[in-house]
Structure formats: structure tokens, C-alpha cells
């Protein structure tokens, strides 16, 4: 039997299964948490990327009515919709966050 082929293959499959199980565990924990809705204002925006990589992460910083600030990761298509000064609704459940622009 050629172990030089099977050992790396089994390691790769094990890593993939471990990542899937970990993501499922996090999702189950988040679903058990209460949903919290808060109204805030966008006070800053930024994009984070590693030089030499095409991977980008988009963030908006929100300030809530109690003056607490939170930086929230948003998708690239939503990032362009938010402007500093916009009022938004942030719904949190565990480590998940959803953002929605409030149009008045």
C-alpha cells in the first residue's frame, strides 16, 4: 500500500470535516441566542485587505443611542449602500449580525 498518498489525503479530509463540524457547532450556538435589535448611525467605513491578496473584508462602524460603538462586517454589495450619517438597524444573534439601512 502506498502510504505517501493516503496519509495526506486522510489529513485533508480530516481538516475539511473538522471545519464543517466547527461551523455547524457555532451555527447551533448562535441559533439558541436571543435576537437583539438596535438602532444606530454609521460613523465610519473601512476596507481591510492583505497586500498581494484579492480577499477584502468590508466594515462599517455604528454608534448606538447609548454612545456604544461596534464595527460590523458587511458584504461588499451592502457596503456601497451605507453612507456615513445613515441610520441603520443592527440585528444581532450570537456572533451573527444583520444590518439594514433605515430610509426616512
Image (cartoon, rainbow, N blue to C red):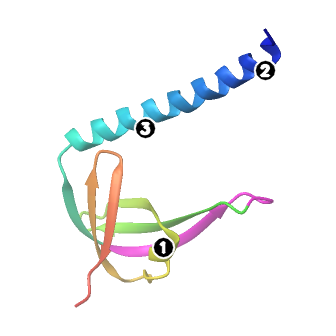
Of residues 43 and 28, the one nearer the viewer is 28
Residue 17's disc is none
Quarter of the image containing the C terminus? bottom left
Asked whether, in this view, residue 57 is left or right of residue 71, the answer is right
The location of residue 10, given as percent across then percent down, is 65, 20
Mark 2: secondary structure: helix
Looking at the image, do the residues carrying marks 2 and 1 touch, with CB atoms under 8 Å apart?
no
Instruction: Say which of 16 and 104 sits in front.
Output: 16
Q: Position of residue 80 (x, y in %)?
A: 49, 81
Instruction: Indicate which disc, 2 or 3, sits on the residue closer to the N terminus.
Output: 2
In this rendering, would 64 be left or right of 74?
left
Q: Which mark is residue 23?
A: 3
Is 39 colored magenta in this rendering?
A: no
Label 1 sits on a secondary structure element that is: strand
Q: Residue at x 43, y 30 (%)?
A: 21
**Disc 2 or disc 1, which is closer to the eye?**
2
- Residue where numbered disc 1 is placed: 44
| Cα gap from disc 2 to disc 1, whole angstroms | 50 Å
* Mark 3 closeness class: few <14, some 14–19, many ≥20 residues within 10 Å: few
* Picture mark count: 3
Q: Residue at x 51, y 27 (%)?
A: 18
Find the magenta span and give its range: 41-53
Identify the disc placed on residue 5.
2
The answer to whether residue 42 is left or right of residue 48 is left
Above or below, 26 against 100 in this view is above
Residue 44 colored in magenta in the image = yes
Disc 3 from disc 1: Cα separation: 30 Å
- Residue sticking out furthest to the bottom: 104
Seen from the viewer's position, the closer of residues 79 and 5 is 5
Mark 3 residue element:
helix
Q: Residue 88, percent across and down? A: 30, 75
Amino acid at each position: 500500500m502506498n502510504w505517501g498518498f493516503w496519509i495526506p489525503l486522510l489529513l485533508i479530509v480530516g481538516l475539511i470535516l473538522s471545519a464543517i463540524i466547527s461551523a455547524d457547532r457555532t451555527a447551533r450556538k448562535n441559533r439558541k441566542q436571543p435576537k437583539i435589535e438596535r438602532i444606530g448611525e454609521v460613523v465610519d467605513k473601512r476596507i481591510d485587505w492583505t497586500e498581494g491578496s484579492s480577499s477584502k473584508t468590508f466594515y462599517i462602524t455604528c454608534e448606538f443611542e447609548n454612545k456604544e460603538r461596534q464595527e460590523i462586517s458587511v458584504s461588499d454589495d451592502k457596503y456601497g449602500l451605507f453612507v456615513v450619517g445613515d441610520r441603520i438597524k443592527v440585528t444581532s444573534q450570537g456572533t451573527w449580525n444583520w444590518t439594514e439601512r433605515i430610509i426616512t
